[in-house]
Amino acid sequence: MRLTPFLLLLIFITSCDKLSFTKKEDLETIDTLVNFTSVDTSPSFKVCDSIFDKALKSDCFRKTIHQKIGGELLKHQFNIKDAINETVYVDLIIDATGKIILDSIQSSENIKKQLPKLDSLIALSIMDLPIIFPAIKKRYKVSTKYQLPIRIFLKD
């Protein structure tokens, strides 16, 4: 009988060492500040996927998308009255699945009047773009918005 309280006291004292009443110092801190104006990895085409440098990968994406859209526009003949040397701005959204959505096309009244089918040609060329890998921010695929300038230079 006397041995039982002694054993219980011994178990209670040794088990308290196994419990930790202090906070663990090695807890991972959560980064609550997120910069929404940049991504960790830019969206990319398959040809740009092997590039690891952030700036070079972004440049590769921009050059590839310009080449693809420009190449499609060069396949068409345009009849104009006056020479055109202007820039059209195409706003694109690349969602988290890699789907490209045409947001808007900003062009002057002169381009709208002389090249009324330009908007639909740009939309068709965007639909024909190859698969895009979406941008990544904090290990998550995110949507991004890009504004692509397209220079229209036509002589009469």
Image: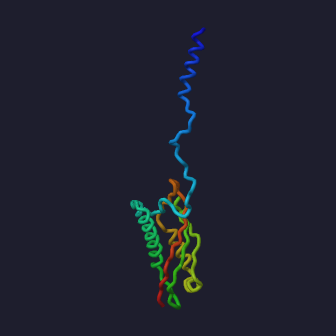
Q: Which of 93 and 80 is in front in this view?
A: 93
Figure check: 96 above or below 153 = above
Counting from the top left corner in percent of width and height, residue 105 is at: 57, 75
Where in the figure is residue 23, as x and y percent of width and height? 56, 38
- Across and down, in percent, residue 134 comes to 50, 60
Residue 153 vertical placement versus 11 (above, below): below
**Picture residue at 56% right of the left edge, 22% below the top:** 13
Residue 89: percent from left, percent from top: 54, 76
In the current view of this chain or complex, which residue is farthest to the top?
Answer: 1
Determine whether, in the image, residue 50 is placed left or right of residue 108. Answer: left
Residue sitting nearer the eye, 116 or 7:
7
User: Where on the picture, by quarter, is residue 33?
Assistant: bottom right
Quarter the N terminus occupies: top right
Q: In the rendered picture of this protein, how many numbered marks are placed on residues?
A: 0
Q: Residue at x 56, y 86 (%)?
A: 114
Q: Residue at x 45, y 66 (%)?
A: 58
| 125, above or below 95, in the image | below
Foreground of the two, 124 or 14: 14
Q: How is the image coloured?
A: rainbow
Front one among 146 and 26? 26
Which quadrant of the figure has residue 142?
bottom right
Q: In which quarter of the image is residue 22?
A: top right
